[in-house]
Amino acid sequence: MKRLNCVLIVDDDRVSNYITENVLRSLAISSMINTVSDGQAALEYIKYQCGEDQDYACPDLIILDISMRMLDGIEFVKEYRKLHTSQSSIIVILSTLPLRQDQIKELKSLGVYDYFVKPISAEKIIGIMEEHFSAVK
């Protein structure tokens, strides 16, 4: 399995972040796992880390909560797509509840690759890795 440059977790739930981070670390898919607690902080992180000259910590994978204060997952994705970064990240959504069909349709139209009900598992991460990152080992 390919090792990713960086994974960004965007979630305001500390317990969920702890679980997600532990799953990612147990799979050793990236030595750099960063966490921010809202969509606005994620946008600032990406603006800083994914500039033309600074892509060291630009995330290959963004694991994003759909329901957050400040800027929710859908609004984050809309704003993220407006950014001109040196790299495009794979975005997957986490939700505490199954999403409605209209939400899934909107997310897919915005280029979100998948969504999962929390907590994320090793099997789900492996599936993401195999689907989106297996071309380069």
Image (cartoon, helix red, strand yellow):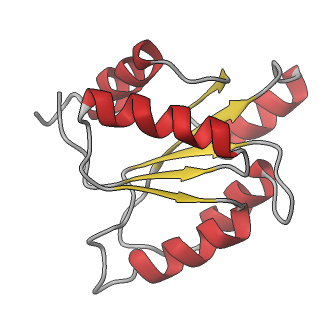
Left or right, 126 with respect to 124, comes to: left
Snapshot quadrant of residue 53: bottom left
Check the image and report above or below for 92 versus 31. Answer: above
- 13 and 101: which is toward the camera: 13
How far across and down, in percent of the image, does residue 8 sit?
Answer: 47, 54
> Height in image: 1 above or below 2?
above
User: Within the image, what quadrant is residue 135 found in?
Assistant: top left
Number of marks: 0
The residue depicted at 81 percent of the width and 18 percent of the height is 98
- Residue 7 visible in the current orientation: yes
**Residue 132 appears left or right of 16:** left
Residue 16 is left or right of residue 101, and the answer is: left
* Residue at the extreme left: 137
Residue 111 visible in this rendered orientation of the protein: no
The quarter of the displayed image where residue 83 is located: bottom right
Q: Residue furthest bottom?
A: 53
Q: Is residue 82 left or right of residue 2?
A: right
Q: Position of residue 109 (x, y in %)?
A: 70, 40
Image position of 131 with respect to 24: above or below: above
Q: Residue placed at 37% from the left, 64% from the top?
A: 87
Q: Quadrant of the N terminus?
A: top left
Residue 6 location (% of width, % of height) = 33, 55
Where residue 28 sits: x, y (%)?
23, 35
Spot the residue most to the top. 123
Image quarter (top left, top right, bottom left or bottom right) of the C terminus: top left
Q: Is residue 4 above or below residue 121?
A: below
Residue found 37% across the figure and 66% down from its top: 58
